[in-house]
Amino acid sequence: MSAFNETIESRGEKPPTTVNVWDPFVRVFHWSLAALFLVAFLTGDDIEQVHIAAGYTIAGLVGLRVIWGFIGPAHARFSNFVRSPRDVLVYLRDIALFRAPRHLGHNPAGGAMIVALIIMLIGTSATGYMLTTDAFWGAKWAGEVHEVFANLTVALIVIHVLGVLLASFEHRENLVKAMITGRKRSA
């Protein structure tokens, strides 16, 4: 049956082969983080217990993702996608000119976005935790810093989504689907 499926052609062409890129941990982390951040952002001060629970869960997930960035499979490792600022700027220029090379894993801009989001989420989680301690309970400045981190995270999420849409369009591949299935076309 599999030999038969391999010979089936679509409009005279073989369907493109795919490879596994995003492991289950990265995919579950990504979508869980998205949902939890939305919950935390929407609940804010209104439903404090839910907000705090979502925040602690986010902090735990980010901690696990940092560890996974060193010990996970190739495409999950920071060494695979964290690039120099120059490489990121060159990639951003090239994507604006619609000539950016396709990357099987994260492109340089995507790698920079991951690092930026992790930093913002650590800042948001740390200041959120501070607000639950006796030392910082009711400290206006700590609440303001927490809100700045959260709002900067929202801005980064918007840029991230726009970048995913642009890269999907430019390289003619559905990156959202790839983050669900874990698979991307091989070439």
Image: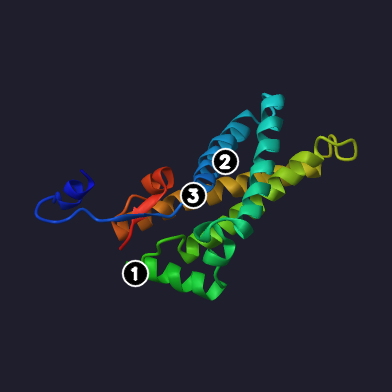
What's the amino acid at mark 3? Asp
Residue of label 2: 33
Are the residues tagged 2 and 3 within 8 Å (C-beta)?
Answer: no
User: Residue at 43% of width from left, 47% of height from top?
Assistant: 179
Q: As drawn, is 74 to the left or to the right of 2?
A: right
- Few, some or many C-alpha atoms within 10 Å of disc 3 (few <14, some 14-19, many ≥20)? some
Mark 1 to mark 3 CA distance (whole Å): 31 Å
User: Residue 112: percent from the left, percent from the top?
Assistant: 55, 62
Tag shown at residue 23: 3
**Looking at the image, is mark 2 or mark 3 earlier in the sequence?**
3
User: For the residue labelled by badge 2, is the local secondary structure a helix, a strand or a loop?
Assistant: helix
Q: Is residue 2 above or below residue 42?
A: below
**Helix, strand, or loop for circle 3?**
loop
How many other residues sit within 10 Å of disc 1, few (<14), some (14-19) or many (≥20)? few
Q: Which residue is mark 1?
A: 97
Q: How far separated are the C-alphas under marks 1 and 2?
A: 32 Å
- Is label 1 in contact with label 3 (beta carbons under 8 Å)? no
The answer to which quarter of the image holds residue 96 is bottom left
Per the model, the C-alpha gap separating discs 2 and 3 is 15 Å
Q: Quadrant of the N terminus?
A: top left
